[in-house]
Image (cartoon, helix red, strand yellow):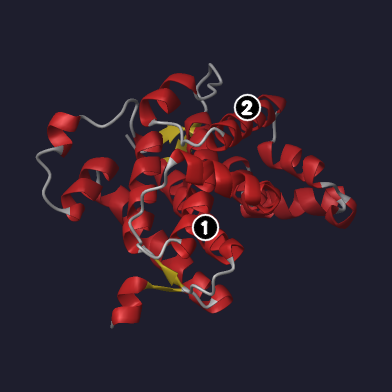
Amino acid sequence: MTQTDKYKTLAALIRGYFTAYINGIYDAMNKQNDGKITPLTMKTLAMEHYENMVGGFNDTMFFIISQLNYSLDEIEKQLKAMGAGNTSLFELMRMACRTDEMFEAMTTEYKRNVTAILEGRFTKAVEHFKNYTRNGTEDPVDNELAIRLLVRTVMTAYTMGIREAKTGKATLRQATLIGLLTENITLILHDKPLDTAKTDRINTMDEYIRYVCGTDENICAMMDEMNVTYENIIKNEGIISNDDMAN
């Protein structure tokens, strides 16, 4: 299968933004670097950084969601027609979603994820698959585009979280990033949580990524977009990975 559902992708992108943002804050503030966020800690981080977390959503997700629905040329034409300099973020997000149905789905998924974080939890895969907003009609998007947008969302939001923490930390925690990417790509490429009978037999991260992605093409899309986004992060944010720091 070379395509997935656009609404499934939208739901994963929104979840990916919020999980990555909170994890970025936590990793920047957590000296133990254990990657484990307690419910109380998550509630505290969400409340303390709520304004910038939700404010950053529109800034980050406008262009990403737009690419689900338009070509780059179409986005440029839409912005020119709207006179983007005088357009509210609300109007821009409606444009990005293209249809009322997708805008409503975006709003629902946004509220679902924010509510969960304020309760001190991320939505689990089984909950996500059961509850994410569906369109009811076939609305496909290429797997490659869906994966690339997810990678860009997660890495950007994670970096934003690191900056939001204001600890001076300038490194990415690779284990966190790979975990965020694989769990959210799973939500795009699969229709149910991964089979634990299979994952329990996996011994390496390469094997796990292959199980999640399924094909060489999907793996290449993930890895290539990671490299592209990482280079942009180095250039624009001055943040490097722990692996690079060690070299």
Figure quadrant of the C terminus: bottom left
Q: Position of residue 123 (x, y in %)?
A: 45, 32
Q: Position of residue 202 (x, y in %)?
A: 12, 44
Determine crowd level at label 1: few under 14, some 14-19, many 20+ residues with C-alpha closer than 10 A. many
Name which residue type carries label 2.
Answer: Thr
Q: Is residue 69 above or below residue 53?
A: above
Residue 223, image quadrant? bottom left
Is residue 61 in sight in this rendering? yes
Can I make out residue 214 in this image? no
Q: Nearer the viewer, mark 1 or mark 2?
A: 1
Q: Does residue 135 appear to the left or right of 91 in the view shown?
A: left
Mark drawn on residue 162: none
Q: Position of residue 226 (x, y in %)?
A: 40, 62
In which quadrant of the rendered view does residue 171 lie? bottom left
Q: Residue 25: which disc?
A: 1
Question: Left or right: 104 with respect to 18?
Answer: right
Task: Give the quarter of the figure containing the N terminus.
Answer: top left
x, y percent for residue 181: 38, 49
Residue shown at 84% from the left, 49% from the top: 81
Q: What SS does tag 2 mark? A: helix
Name the residue that disc number 2 marks.
108
Answer above or below: position of 59 versus 140.
Answer: below
Callout 1: SS: helix
Seen at 59% across and 31% down, the residue is: 115
Q: Residues within 10 Å of mark 2 (few under 14, many from 20)?
A: some
Camera-nearest residue between 64 and 164: 164
Give the alpha-carbon distance from disc 1 to disc 2, as whole Å. Answer: 24 Å
Name the kind of residue labelled 1 in the image.
Answer: Ile
Tell me: residue 199, above or below residue 29: above
- For the view shown, which residue lies furthest in the top direction? 136
- Would residue 159 appear left or right of 205 to someone viewing this image? right
